[in-house]
Image (tube, rainbow, N blue to C red):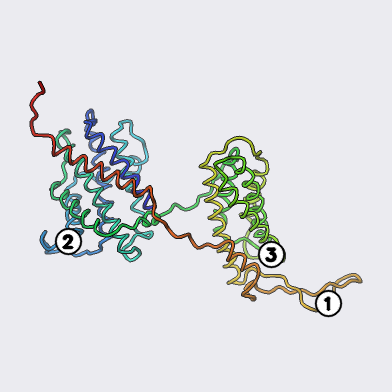
Amino acid sequence: MYGDNTAAMRSELATLLQLARNHHTNGLTPGDVEQIAAFRTSLTLWCQQAVRASNPIVDLGGTTPRSRGPAEELRHRLDQARTGYTTGLPDLDQLATPHPQHVVDTWRRAAKAAVLGEHDFPAGLSYDQMSDEQAMTVLKDAAEITRALTGLDRHYTTTIPSWEPITDANLLGRAAVVCAAHAGYTPPDYRIDHKGWRPPVQLADGPALPGLTGVLQAQNNLLFHLQHQPDGYSLRLILDSQRIVSRHAATLAQHDSRGAGFADRWAERARTYTLLVDQTRNLRGLVGHGHAAAEGAIAAARIQKLQPTGLIEIQALRHLDALFTHIDRRLHDVIVAGARDRSYLMRVTIPRIDLTAPGAVKAPRARHVPLDVRPDSPLLMAVANRLDPRPTPLTRSPRGVTERRAFIDAVDSTETSRRSVPASSPPRL
């Protein structure tokens, strides 16, 4: 997501600014400097894309500093700076392999976050998909990160002989300051942190993992296989497996003081799936397969073997709760889609006797009708009310506010310390 990637960039750049203030950049080899320059190129590219996404004016031909606005001026200076770089973008091995030198590895982590952040712009962060407040928030983030890059550039230019300075770094820094102030006049909308690219669910192959981790593994695989519609019988098995998993997960969470909130929510989820199992007892459908049902049965079997003793990692509980949410929404979509394309049928009785039935006692005749024949079908109503896939309203992230404030303070303190140090300080007596 955008919030995670930008938070990682701010965190690593704040660390680099602190290291620069403490003069911890000595001992860098020419190869280290070249890698840092490549990582700087990735961060500059992210800033370019962020400015373009928040202010999509593409024709800058014939403009001057007087005719360009704050965003256009920053984009022009970023384009000029990146054009002047002689070092290209880092390759995949450089981004993925930790570096033994701490300063280089910090740059690597920041560049890795920038590369991941490039996926956010086509996945919900284009200008037509953002509000004006969100666009200004993205613009301010790009301006503050540019300020950090120019601050680091000024320090490296004076301390590293082989460092390649940014072209017109002072003009770029000034444009970043002006643009950050301009974007700051608009109230920020930190709901933008929840937008962007999310990695797709991957199949977790391999042997069964121990404890609750094995349940998470099976639940993850269940979610993966729910990309394809299960048949009617498999759908009922999936619903029953989620009933079992929810009930036992609530029991496990009750024995941990940190899981009290999860226990109540999961107990309610178990009641929901109990209701759905009852309402799908006459559901039929031959379209689909049963891979997801197999993973659901594995998850139910594994959690039944766990004893409610000992401490459970809070991160595992949060992960399980997130999986529950995604599975609920996916099952909602599956059932609604099956009703719309009439691949799921409901067996209903009609007021007639089935004379072809064997034996002396004749049962009522039955017929299979599409699930959506009755708009007020109890199953569809329960799915809509209890497996509601509508996302909860995105709220402002308190962590995003504090991280941004701390990062701006780090950049400001670097600027203040640079201005306060005279060109030649006399020795102390």
Horizontal side of residue 380 vs 48, given as left or right: right
Disc 1 versus disc 2: nearer the observer: 2
Per the model, the C-alpha gap separating discs 3 and 1 is 24 Å
User: Quick one: quadrant of the C terminus?
Assistant: top left
Is label 1 in contact with label 2 (beta carbons under 8 Å)?
Answer: no
Residue 73: x and y in percent read 17, 57
Q: Is residue 342 above or below residue 409?
A: below
Q: Is residue 11 above or below residue 394?
A: above
Q: Which mark is residue 279?
A: 3
**Residue at the spot of label 2:** 69
Q: Amino acid at mark 2?
A: Gly
Q: Which mark is residue 353?
A: 1
Closer to us: 12 or 270: 270
Mark 1 / mark 2, whichever is N-terminal: 2
Disc 3 versus disc 1: nearer the observer: 3
Is disc 2 placed on a helix, strand or loop?
A: loop
Mark 1 packing: few (<14 Cα in 10 Å), some, or many (20+)? Answer: some
Q: Amino acid at mark 1?
A: Ile
Mark 2 packing: few (<14 Cα in 10 Å), some, or many (20+)? Answer: some
When asked about the image quadrant of residue 313, the answer is top right
Closer to us: 187 or 93: 187
Is disc 3 placed on a helix, strand or loop?
A: helix
